[in-house]
């Protein structure tokens, strides 16, 4: 294709897009407030963070461009960052998929209950995950003295002779955090799946029965999952975001920093450099690596989910 013909086609495409935008101008006007807020508070901070990641910036002085030095130091000289990456990937690889599947299965089972019982069970299931007393309760359960519930139970059964320091001994800290994070990860995804299940037309199951679907697992694969792909995508995004954004639970239960950095995560490292040391350029580099890691994994997960029921 010649350059002139390519430019003509491009101009025609731009003119067609302009006509479509003018034709649907009312829709764009209604979308404008959200678009402005989204750009200002989501897109712009990401772009600013990427820019600062190539600078030395301590808030007190103007940023100085230093190229890739922050990234080189992160990957080649910062052992704590590498430990935090390992811990974050372990948490994400275990709690992400298990929490995602568990949230869907719980929603699937609860959706079969009668209406009022379903509403009550949903409240009971979801409310603890947003309670402010969560960390206090888990802290009591895994307390490192004889009054901790786990230690007390194991010592009364004769399994332990002395209390285990669940939240300060590096051997036990990661398994404990995995249990707590997994429990806390069920909330938002569970509600999304429950909402998706409640919108599926019942007549589809009747039609499937006529077409030869003979059990609930075939019903799940051929009818339920294909008709709630949107909610599956949303649940996947939430699971990825939560599993890679772990920070508060490790600080509340294991301290900051944790013993030998046993449960130190990337977000903990980001908070350390951004909010405590005020090395904003270095913190921006950490945030940029985390952001693009989540983007790549999210794209892979969505590609896999598109095959469900196809």
Image (cartoon, rainbow, N blue to C red):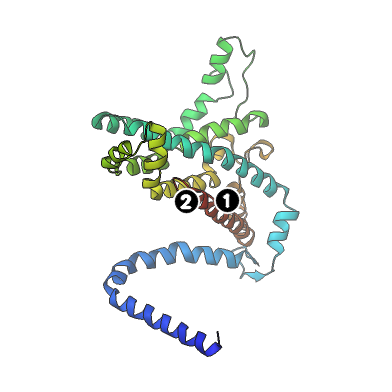
Q: Nearer the viewer, residue 254 or 177?
A: 177
**Which residue is found at the position 28% from the left and 77% from the top?**
23
Classify residue 164 as left or right of residue 187.
right
**Which residue is found at the position 47% from the left and 64% from the top?**
43
Q: Nearer the viewer, mark 2 or mark 1?
A: 2
SS of the residue under disc 2 = loop
Classify residue 257 as left or right of residue 232.
right
Q: Residue furthest bottom?
A: 4
Q: Nearer the viewer, residue 100 or 138?
A: 100
Classify residue 121 as left or right of residue 281.
left
Classify residue 203 as left or right of residue 270.
left
State how far apart marks 2 and 1 are (Cα): 35 Å
Question: Mark 1, residues whose alpha carbon is within 10 Å: few (<14), some, or many (≥20)?
Answer: some
Where 73 sits versus 36, above or below?
above
Residue 166: image x %, image y %? 60, 27
Picture disc at residue 306: 2
SS of the residue under disc 1 = helix
Residue 12: image x %, image y %? 41, 84
Residue 169: image x %, image y %? 66, 29
Quadrant that contains the N terminus: bottom right
Q: On the image, numbered disc 1 is attached to which residue?
A: 271
Residue 259: image x %, image y %? 66, 36
The numbered mark, 2 or 1, whose residue comes first in the sequence reads: 1
For residue 17, what is the image quadrant?
bottom left
Where 144 sits versus 273, above or below?
above
Q: Looking at the image, can residue 46 be seen?
A: yes
């Amino acid at each position: 294709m010649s350059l002139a013909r390519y430019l003509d086609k491009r101009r025609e495409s731009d003119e067609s897009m302009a006509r479509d935008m003018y034709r649907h101008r009312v829709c764009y006007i209604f979308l404008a407030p959200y678009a402005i807020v989204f750009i200002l508070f989501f897109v712009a901070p990401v772009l600013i963070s990427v820019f600062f990641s190539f600078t030395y910036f301590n808030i007190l002085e103007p940023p100085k461009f230093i190229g890739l030095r922050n990234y080189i130091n992160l990957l080649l000289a910062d052992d704590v960052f590498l430990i935090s990456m390992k811990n974050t990937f372990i948490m994400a690889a275990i709690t992400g998929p298990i929490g995602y599947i568990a949230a869907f299965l719980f929603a699937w089972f609860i959706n079969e209950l009668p209406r009022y019982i379903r509403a009550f069970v949903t409240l009971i299931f979801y409310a603890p995950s947003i309670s402010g007393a969560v960390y206090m309760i888990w802290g009591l359960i895994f307390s490192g003295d004889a009054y901790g519930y786990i230690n007390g139970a194991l010592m009364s059964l004769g399994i332990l002779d002395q209390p285990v320091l669940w939240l300060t001994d590096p051997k036990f800290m990661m398994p404990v955090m995995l249990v707590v994070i997994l429990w806390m990860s069920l909330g938002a995804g569970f509600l999304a799946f429950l909402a998706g299940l409640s919108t599926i037309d019942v007549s589809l199951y009747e039609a499937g029965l006529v077409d030869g679907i003979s059990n609930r697992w075939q019903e799940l694969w051929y009818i339920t999952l294909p008709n709630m792909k949107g909610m599956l995508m949303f649940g996947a995004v939430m699971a990825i975001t939560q599993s890679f954004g772990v920070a508060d639970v490790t600080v509340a239960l294991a301290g900051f920093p944790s013993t030998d950095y046993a449960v130190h995560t990337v977000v903990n490292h980001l908070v350390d450099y951004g909010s405590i040391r005020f090395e904003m350029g270095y913190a921006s580099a950490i945030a940029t690596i985390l952001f693009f890691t989540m983007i790549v994994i999210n794209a892979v997960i969505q590609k896999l989910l598109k095959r469900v029921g196809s």
